[in-house]
Amino acid sequence: MHAIVLFSLLCLLPLEASCRVQRAVAPVRIGGSGGERRLRGGSLLDGLEDEADDDDVDDLGLGPPPSSPAAAPAASAEAEAPPADGLTAAEVTEKLNAVPAFVLIANGQLLGSRNEEGEAVLSFFTDAAHARAVLASVKESGKVEGAQLSVLPLGRALEACGGWAKGGGSEETRLSRLVGSPQGDAEFGEHLQKQLEATDRAASSWRLPLFLSNSFQTESMIPVFLSREDLLRGWERAGGDKEKPPNPVMVMDVRVFCDQLQSGMPLAKKIQLVSSLEAFELAKELNPKSVGEPTSS
């Protein structure tokens, strides 16, 4: 095992660990079968030796956030009842893969930090501003050369963090985490922790909120956002009254959300995660040739 190089609270993961996570987050299509958007794969740990052949790497399919649906009331009682069965694990992952996550790398290896026990922790960021701020802090410290951000689909990032199986995943994924906006965790962290405790995930060291509202949907789409601010911006872009925002707004940890999709959440097939414009722009910046036409809603 290669030794982990420690830079104060920063550390490069061992080469073997980097390769394992690289395989776990192998590029996939993003946005579903109807998406024409493309993001070329291979952005994560480019140049890192791995077992995969370049020709075997699929393309990602990420584009700008889809135009938000027009504000509309929930479907009427006369509407056709949704199917009783939930989505498959692959379908749930495909839903998550509609939005990007970001990870720090340096010199062809994943860049993590030390927790209080001195263990190397790997973070995947969903908030673009937070990811940029962390990168700026690392560069300012001068302790790591070549630090940069890389992009991957959220579903693959969640898999690298143990997925949504109860029990926290394997030992290899226990020290990986998803990180949303600091504001979201401060405001909703206690609420999300109660959800995790109720679903046998109390030991989890991280939380990631998702936001949706029954009063913000169309006949074909139920948008889900990674921050309340993004939900409100989407509402206003869709013509919703700023003074009368959607209410109530539901907040769920991403793993509890995945549980719901698999267990037959009403209208699960209409769920669509919506990337913030900032996250899309960062993904575009990291992969200049990646962006095609946005998916229509």
Image (tube, rainbow, N blue to C red):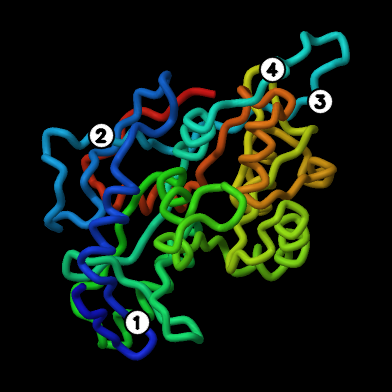
Q: Residue furthest bottom?
A: 8
Along the line of sight, the residue nearer the viewer: 49 or 97: 49
Above or below, comparing residue 186 to residue 219 in the picture: below
Question: Which residue appears at 17% of the width and 69% of the height?
Answer: 107
Q: Which mark is residue 257?
A: none
User: Gap between marks 1 and 2, in whole Å?
Assistant: 31 Å
Along the line of sight, the residue nearer the viewer: 173 or 146: 173
User: Gap between marks 4 and 3, in whole Å?
Assistant: 10 Å
Q: Which mark is residue 73?
A: 3
Secondary structure at numbered mark 2: loop
Along the line of sight, the residue nearer the viewer: 272 or 205: 205
Secondary structure at numbered mark 1: strand
Quick check: 173 left or right of 104?
A: right
Along the line of sight, the residue nearer the viewer: 224 or 20: 20
Q: Which residue is mark 2?
A: 59
Question: Which residue appears at 54% of the width and 39% of the height?
Answer: 274
Q: Which residue is mark 4?
A: 219
Question: Which residue appears at 46% of the width and 37% of the height?
Answer: 98
Name the residue type under label 1: Leu
